[in-house]
Amino acid sequence: MSERPNIVIIMSDQQRADVSAREGFALDTTPFLDALATEGVWFKRAYTSMPACLPARVSMLTGRYPGATRARTNHNGEDVTCERDLYQLLREAGYRTALCGKNHSHVGPDDMDHYFPLGHHGGFGPERTPAEVAFDDYLAGLRHRADFKPAPGGVEVQCPYRAVSSAIDFVDSAADEPFFLWLSFPEPHNPYQAPEPYFSLFPPDTLPPTLSDVSALEGKSFKYRWLRQIGETAFTDYAEQLPQARSNYFAILRLIDDQVRRFVGHLDARGLRDNTILFFLSDHGDYVGEYGLVRKGAELPEVLVRIPFQVCGPGILAGAEPHEAHVSIVDILPTLCEATGIPVPDGVQGRSLWPLLSGDDWPREEFASAYAEQGFGGLHYTEDDDFDPQQDGFHPAISFDELNGWTQSGNMRMLRRGDWKLLFDMQGRGQLYNLAQDPVELNDLYDDPACAAIRGELLAELLAWTLRAQDPLPHPRRRYRFKSDPRNYWSPYRES
């Protein structure tokens, strides 16, 4: 067994943070993960860098925000800018590396020792079994809809099962060397489907109500309303699908939970748990019926930007209660650098969480807020624009992409600090919410005179965050010496 820790990052795709019993949700969707969280540190104020797959995943692998990586949409993988990513760092340090499951980042098979890709339509290539091919054809045929019937083929054709099987093969081949595994499930991302016995676990008529419904769209921006409009254009039964989509979403979370249990059980059986740092997180969330919507797309609501995030392993303290810090997906790379003794590359913007995980002293003000980005730039598209949807890839006969020229246009930035949340865009328009009183952000307090002081404080802090998130690369070529904290902290150590 290697003396250096093995590293496993388990990622789900589009998992909303608050739909677990650990967070107070009425359904027990992830019992194993809830229990596993108490074996280490879990964060209730963890955030993605951007609620879109590729930008968030690139941020995790590079420790940089989308504005710095240049990956501000799902279509900019070839534009990624960084000095070193996580795969490069760990391979250079002697780690065996693998990806089992969904990729959707800038890395590929040449960047790792073991590569088993899966997507929202299943697997690829001729090595699939006939049952897997049939299931993959079924997934593609759903056109990202919700299925009102149990998915065919049983559990073993499902992507989480196949990803874990490949991951187990990799672990068994690399167990005598330090290894890094990204175990990446394409679910619970649409299409919304689940096989029995999971399909029947949470029937639509037994689900807890959402905190808002379609009537909330009248108080939100055009982008929210546009999402509902294109959904109804593509699927005339959009409203009827919502309860079943929620039911299937919660069901597939339980299936994922059982597959995480299977994988972790294998680590236990091989005697690898004690030397393995194990992350579980998601790249971003899903509306899951909030505002009468599913999927993602509009702005930066909590249901999209806050993510599940937990870590356990050697040197990491155990705790039943969530950690108080505000953390980000960009913090993973520098955290692993400190855990493995690898120098943090130039240009990394995330901060090491190792002191928070290990119980050492850490500066409270450094983690008193979180920041996220959204948008590819330019002006916002509005209902007044003459913009043919089909020029933007909208083909109702096939499906629709909620991440489109309308929903992703412009630029928006977000700050979360305690109970407060501030949104601000490039045209100087702000939104302010008290999340303790208004968790789905329906009561905008930005222009409320009683909130003027807190608004001013948050605006100043958001400005500081946007300056920190500016790309420091390239460093000055002559004379000037770049100064940074070894852990990339910006705040001094104060109270413990």
Image (cartoon, rainbow, N blue to C red):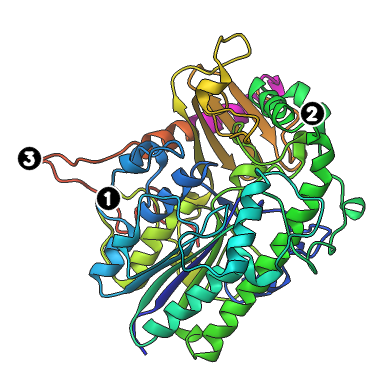
In the figure, is residue 177 to the left or right of 295? left
Whether residue 311 can be seen here? no
Classed neighbour count for the residue bearing mark 1: other residues with Cα under 10 Å, few (<14), some (14–19), many (≥20): few
Number of residues whose C-alpha sits closer than 10 Å to that of mark 3, classed few (under 14), some (14–19) or many (20 or more): few
Q: In this view, does 119 lie above or below 128?
A: above
Q: Does the magenta stretch include residue 359?
A: no
Please state if 473 lies on the left or on the right of 286 as rendered: left
Q: Residues within 10 Å of mark 2 (few under 14, many from 20)?
A: some
First-in-chain label (2 vs 3): 2
The kind of secondary structure element at disc 3 is loop
What residue range appears in magenta?
447-460
Residue annotated with mark 3 = 478
**Depth order, front residue of 389/338:** 389
Is the magenta region chiefly helix, strand or loop? helix
State the image coordinates of residue 82 (x, y, percent, origin top left): 28, 47
* Quadrant position of residue 472: top left
Q: Is residue 293 above or below residue 95?
A: above
* Residue topped by disc 1: 484
Q: What's the residue at 30%, 54% (across, down)?
A: 485
Q: Is 468 placed left or right of 454 in the picture?
A: left
Looking at the rendered structure, the kind of residue marked 1 is: Ser
Q: Dot 2 corresponds to which residue?
A: 216
* Amino acid, disc 2: Ala
Residue 31 position, x and y percent, is: 73, 71
